Amino acid sequence: MKKLLIICWFLLVSVSVTFAQRQTIKGRVSDAATGEPLVMVNVQLKGSTTGTQTDATGTFSLTVPDAQTGVLLISYLGYQALTQNIHGNSNIVVKLEKDNKQLDEVVVVGYGEVKKRDLTGAVTSVKGEELRKVPSTNVMESVQGKLPGVDITKSNGAAGAKINVTVRGNRSIRADNGPLYIVDGVQYENIQDINPNDIQSMEVLKDASSTAVYGSRGANGVIIITTKKGASGKPRVFVNTYAGISQVAGYPAMSTGPQYVAQKREANRTTGRWKSEADDPLIFNAAEVASIQNNLWTDYADMLIHDGLQQDYQVGVSGGSEKTKVYLSLDYFDEKGIFKLDHLKRYSARLNIDQTINDYLKAGMQSQVTYYNQDNRRDPLNQANKIVPLNLPYDENGNLILFPNMGSMINPLADEQPNAYQNNGRVTRTFVNAYVELTPLKGLSFRSNLGVTLDNARTGIFASKNTIERSTASASRSQYNSGNKRYISWENVLNYTQKLGDHTFGLTGVASLLSDQRDSSFLQGEGQLLPAQLYYAMQNNVSGIAIRSSYMANKLISFTGRINYNYKGKYLLSLTGRSDGSSKLAPGNKWAFFPSVAGAWRVSDEPFMKSQRVFSDLKIRASYGLAGNDAVPPYATASYLTKIPFSYDDTNSALAYGIGSQIGNRNLKWELSATTDIGLDMSFFDGRIGATIDLYDTKTKDLLLQRTLPSSSGVSTVIQNIGKTRNRGIEIGINTVNVRGRNFSWNSNIVFSRNKEEIVALADANTNDVANGWFIGYPVRVFYDYEKTGIWQTKEADAASAFGYKPGDIKVRDQDGNGVLNSQDRVILGRQVPTWSGGLNNDIRFMNFDLNVYVFARIGQWINSEYAAKYDPQGLENSAPLDYWTPEHETNAYPRPNASVSKDGTPFIRTLGYKDGSFVKIRNISLGYTLPGSALKNLHLTNLRVYVTGKNLFTFSKVKDYDPERGGDLSNPLTKMYVAGLNVEF
């Protein structure tokens, strides 16, 4: 009985202690500035899953096991997270401060940095994490559709293919419209060298006030790349790798053997030469007849296209002390294209060092060495798509049949044979940017940057006589091209900032010298002694010896001044002026001054905005500025001499020289662009929704345009300042936090860009230049032709006859209704630039899983489809399997085959290819898993993430089995890729 009483007493004490420890606490959470209650604030007990949220009055109630030592974690979107000790309190009052982290983010601009809240220009910033979501050869491909106002397309599907980038449309008609790339403060042309894993951030400067500090170089927009730097403390090691299989994203098939036979029979039935299969020997050779009887034919495109492979391996180390910081990165990138002989290898090493010497002196260096070894393949699909398919590529012994069926067309597989073809390029590029920074006084700094880029390249091409390129020649051809580039940039930047009460001033002065020198040489010969010598031992070629060399250099000297002013952080003003002197332009016109002004008003910081709850942030921006462009070759102001063949008689030749095809222009001056920009930056509902809207209008005059001259002048062209263009549009970027919880979050980004590009004036003011395809009021690149309305049908025989045509011919619209079809009936059919483009990016996180889905759209662009125009009415070459007209099958798609009329002789044949090339594509789907902290600790790792990615998986368009981003060409089709990757940090 005594033991029982002791046990009962012990249990009673234990229960009492437990109830004494467990306690329900209450509290209220409000805005520290306004006192307004905050709804749905997350309140969680640290180290447990116990948690709750505040109600409509901002109050919460939570039962905790220990009210003395318990700690609450309180978080709310748009506010700074707070850790609150309970200390036995049963009624807790919490005041949360707004989180201005986004507004206080530092954004890199020309020759400096500013907080995002203080921006006056149109600048888009992208962090390095975003750049790494899409595995790519070129970092610009990974931001396609994610930057408002920036149009990015991939030129083709070959390994290492070029990425085309324009910012706010095409200003120039023939001059370069690509943006200026700045890497760590220095101009760098080869953005494809930079590994996305080495990038800390990317900023895109779009309006004139932002780009004005770069003067003529920034006329087409500026993209600033900042690479990673070392950090003090324990060294961190990063390992990033991925491997993926690439496949053609869509490739339409040519006619099969039976389809080709049917079309050629119909072509000869039209002329009366073929009536039945008994007449096949009249239109096919003996080998082709045998192939028809045995149903033998070959799909050469299918034999040429294979799966490609892309892989990347990068190791980075970041570390240092308080005074010395180092970042080192090594990378190996390997891409095999979808064709044999298409292979790119890239090796790169980056070393960034920052050294603090004393309190007022710093020095450092950013450097990279890149080496390329690339095999390029002459596109074989053109040959594969036109060769008659009624043959086999190999004989019974497995040997290649060079000219199948004894025809005139060489086998499309010829280049893949041993010692037949090689096109190999080697590039070594060294980039070094060293700086010294002096801060003698508070707020005053002087920085001198010296950037050097050394580029050494050579390309060797060998094509034996048994290759596609030389199939009609009698000997092989060897070519050896070499080139060197030396780019030097020396810039001295003086910055001074001063705060006087509510007034803050920032002054920047820049003096810079840019030097660009290039030389190249070209060797060519035919009939190489030994095929194994390829493009070496050029002296062994027996004929066709050609030697050329060239040299060009130009310099740009610039002086820049900028004043930044703000009052109470609410009223912002920026004034910039830059004077550029270019050696490319004519004496008297070498120098030009480019001013700009920008202002912003932070409306959300006004007292009258404090009581409202809709806007978290609101800023209005406006800017105007002038930018220049000197994008012409050096020496365009001078006429040059060239050697010409000359002889006094049939036997006595002599040296003679004449003016080159392009005459110099001694009045050449700057191309000028004036841009007005009005912008709005805002966020709503405590930062849950953020938006940026920009309206812009760019007017360009004095275009640097190559003009065709009459043949009677004795020369062909001249570059002049003639014509005007205009680009105006709207850009919208929206960021939303759809869901944000402890274990689940969902963020979205929406981008919309609409640009209207048009030519305003040409050489003869308002007169169109039809020969070059330039039209007033339209973009630079359009399709101008007859408008196809169908095919003349049998019942329309009389109407067709009135125009000189017959049923089965292409029918086009008589635009002026005069009963005559002539060149005056041609119209603008479509534009090669999109009406609008946009993207939708979704990032979803659940526990340790992350999912990214990105959709990209390009709407309103037209393409000239090579596949749609792949129609040979005679049947001499293969065609696409098209719906052509016959008396028994009347259609409005394609004309009747006709063996007596060549493709070029078929009226209006070019109208067949024009198609609406609008598309929407699933650009990226990526699923990743990050190892939890407990597992990482056991593995002695800081972070480990594995992921799988599908790139360019699905494309939706009116063009079947083809990715319209390619632009209509059938050569080097675009690819999709399946990737698996790993990110590790020690």
Image: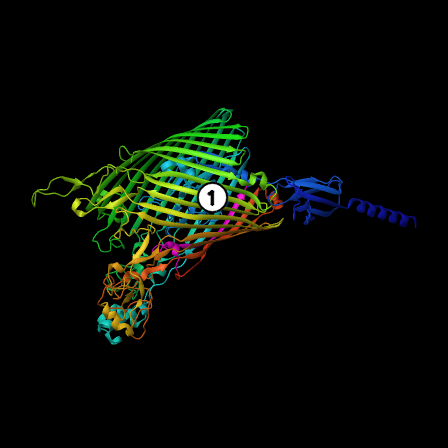
Residue 641 image position (x, y, % from top left): 19, 39
Viewer-closest of 192 and 416:
192
Q: State the residue at coordinates (31%, 75%).
A: 888
Q: Relative to 262, does residue 170 appear above or below in the rendering?
A: above
Q: Amino acid at mark 1?
A: Gly
Viewer-closest of 547 and 854:
854
Residue 968 among those drawn in magenta? yes
Quarter of the rendering containing residue 859: bottom left
Q: SS class of the residue under badge 1?
A: strand
Q: State the residue at coordinates (47%, 35%).
A: 573
Quarter of the rendering containing residue 723: top left
Residue 475 among those drawn in magenta? no
In the displayed orientation, state which residue is furthest to the front.
608
User: Which residues make up the magenta segment?
Assistant: 962-986
Q: Quadrant of the C terminus?
A: top right
Which residue is disc 1 drawn over? 679
- Left or right for 429, reference 30: left
Residue 532 image position (x, y, % from top left): 28, 48
Quarter of the rendering containing residue 831: bottom left
Pointer 1: residues within 10 angstroms few (<14), some, or many (20+)? many
Q: Relative to 472, does residue 373 appear above or below in the rendering?
A: above
Residue 52 image position (x, y, % from top left): 69, 49
Residue 593 image position (x, y, % from top left): 35, 34
In the displayed orientation, state which residue is furthest to the top.
440
Viewer-closest of 674 and 475:
674
| Tally of numbered discs | 1
Q: State the residue at coordinates (7%, 46%).
A: 650
